[in-house]
Image: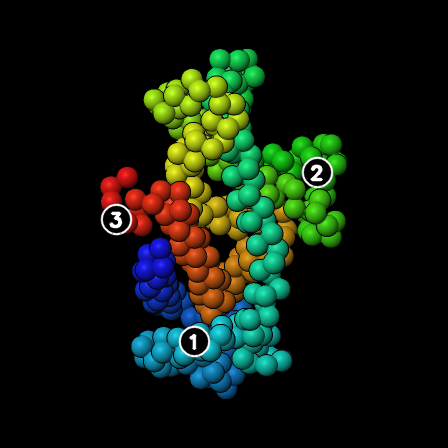
Amino acid sequence: MGSYIARRVLQGIFTLLATTLLFHASITVLPGDPVRALFGFRQPVPRIADAIREDFHLNDPYIVQYGHYLWDLLHGDLGNSYPRDVYGGALGGIPINPLVSGALPVSLRILLAAILLQLVLGLGLGMLMSLRERTQLSRWLYLGVVVAAAVPVIVSAFALKNVFAGSLQVLPYGGVNDGWRSYVMPVLAVAATGTAYVVLLTRSELMNTMRQRYIKAAEARAIPEYRVVGLHALRASLLPAVTYVSANLGQLVTGLLIVEGIFNLPGLGGLLFNAIQRQDRALIVSIILLVTLAVIVANIVADVLYAVIDPRIRLGRPA
């Protein structure tokens, strides 16, 4: 197991370095002058513009710019954002580390709660629907899950906002000033589609697993149903659900950024949209780096869980 984890960590580090190079290069060579954009409709002051370009190494060849970025990154420094007021304050802008550390907890709360909701509610409803597949409750649940799987996250967010914050007025309209109640609608909006797919995957896998001979043998020995499902059938059916949750993390983060904008939350989504509007390349690259790191770490954790659930994976044998 130790060598398997080490191999996956090394692969993750290589992927992270390749991703930083790809995004840093693509954003750096984007058309437009970010320094000129700082001045808006005003004529740039040559002295200030030159000082900003010098501070951010924008006059250096790209390989030198990327070298400075990696060196700062290795020291835990994400650099500075582009200055908001070129006529006052520091030309180097605000340090990115405190900006990200202030926004990250909001995004992490929503993301972790959405993943937990996907697994708990998805596996629970999937088990219920597979064990009671011929009941009226299961049919209605299946219809609701199919509808939820087809609804985009942006539609879910606006629908929840209009119903619970607008019509019923039982939840806050936006922001994070109402404690846990501020996160209810964002978490539901982010997790809705993924939870529906987890339900469908769990239901399908459990229905197939319950038809296997070793399950029939366990039932014939009068083992209680909850033990047959929980100890035997569910473990054998977990891989598709875990695979989907880990593979879908990138899409989940994308939905998170959209939802944060809709509910006016001070997370990474709001920070990213603000950086895009201001052409703040340093801040954009830093946020993308953090998102990529989160996806890589989640995939490594998921791979370790695969190996725990099915030892044939870490031994390199066909499943």
**In this picture, is 45 found above or below 164?**
below
Foreground: disc 2 or disc 3: 3
Question: Residue 289 appears at what percent x and percent y?
Answer: 44, 63
Residue placed at 63% from the left, 51% from the top? 264
Q: Say which amino acid is labelled 3.
A: Gly
Q: Residues within 10 Å of mark 2 (few under 14, many from 20)?
A: some
Amino acid type of disc 1?
Answer: Leu
Give the Cα distance between marks 2 and 1.
Answer: 44 Å
The N terminus lies in quadrant: bottom left
Q: Secondary structure at mark 2?
A: helix
Q: Earlier in the sequence, mark 2 or mark 3?
A: 2
Q: Is residue 188 visible?
A: yes
Which x, y percent locates residue 122? Answer: 51, 34
Residue 46 rendering spot, x and y as whole percentages: 48, 84
Q: Which residue is mark 3?
A: 316
**SS at circle 3:** loop
Quarter of the picture holding the C terminus: top left
Q: Secondary structure at mark 1?
A: helix
Residue visible at 59% across and 81% down? 90
**Which residue, given by chain and number where applicable, does mark 2 sit on?**
165
Determine which of the numbered discs, if any, sits on residue 74 in the image: 1
Measured in 3D between alpha carbons, the distance from the residue under mark 1 to the one under mark 3, in whole angstroms, is 33 Å
Q: Is residue 236 above or below residue 292?
A: above
